[in-house]
Amino acid sequence: MTERSRHGGPLWAAYEYMAMVVGLGFLAFICLLWLPFAMILHPLLPRRWGQPLGRWAIMIGFRIYTTFLELFCACRFDLAGIDKLRDQGALIVVANHPSLLDVVLIVSRLPNAVCVMKAQLMDNILFGAAARLARYIRNDSALDMVRDARMELQRGAQLVIFPEGTRTTSFPINPCLPTAGLIAKRSGTAVQALCIEFSSPYLGKQWPLFKRPELPLRFCVRLGERFPAPREVSAFTSTLEEYFRSELSSPDASTAPRRNSPQGATRPHQS
């Protein structure tokens, strides 16, 4: 059977449907497995114990999930670039956001990651208890969000933000919001860019949840530039958007991963 017929035939389509159902089901299983423990431990454990335990559990759970997808669902993930950030201390990690899988891929490699989450996700039955134990940050109050993010960065966390604010609808990237620049300025923390490249925008904003994926699915998270904390938020936001647009706009950017830079090249301060 040729590559074309294998990927276009009814048997392959049936496998894609099965992989979708099994993959989503396994994610729900992992979340439900941790749910009662997270609900009980959150009020019982002090922050100094509950927070690292919660973040470690999410990282391990997502790592198990990505391994499952590679073994059984024809997914291929190149995440070596993220691994280089593990021991680099406090950073604001920003990435483009083509898919719901993006946060799973990033957090699966960072043991001290903290995410800025939509309030409705923090209250979600599957994700809420785990997120609260890990002390993830709600986005329903801008003032509280910036304050909490600054405190987490002072504790050495790596803050994960998608500067588009939602999944990409206008590829290669939507207009960026000033959130990352504002937090970076207030905290004096560098901003590390990650470029997510993909073979198919599976679970993107315009991809229905139960539409079958186009397998094999390939994701590469490439280590991009590191920007010093900005002095001017608006200029930095424009620079960040232009950077992502430039990096992701080449014709083969979604299907031809590039080499990761060892530490992330550094750009000068924004004036």
Image (cartoon, grey):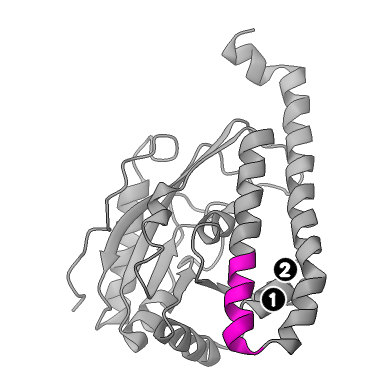
Is 212 rendered above or below residue 108? above
- Quickly name the residue at label 1: 122
Quarter of the image where the C terminus is located: bottom left
Q: Does dot 1 land on a helix, a strand or a loop? A: helix
What secondary structure do most residues of the magenta stretch adopt? helix
Q: Residue shown at 56%/64% (left/top)?
A: 166
| Cα distance in 3D space between marks 1 and 2 | 7 Å
Q: Inspect the image, locate mark 1, and give the three-letter code of the amino acid beneath it.
A: Met
Residue 137 image-quadrant placement: bottom right
Query: Magenta segment range?
Result: 46-57
Q: Nearer the viewer, residue 125 or 56?
A: 56
Quarter of the image where the N terminus is located: top right
| Spot occupied by residue 165 in the image (x, y as percentages of width and height) | 52, 68
Residue 43 visible in the picture: yes
- Quickly name the residue at label 2: 127
Residue 96 image-quadrant placement: bottom left
Query: Are discs 1 and 2 less than 8 Å apart at CB?
Result: yes
| Spot occupied by residue 208 in the image (x, y as percentages of width and height) | 72, 48
Q: Does dot 2 land on a helix, a strand or a loop? A: loop
| Spot occupied by residue 75 in the image (x, y as percentages of width and height) | 59, 37
On screen, residue 107 versus residue 183, left or right, reads: right
Is 8 rendered above or below residue 236? above
Label 1 environment density (alpha carbons within 10 Å; few <14, some 14–19, many ≥20): many
Residue 100 visible in the picture: no
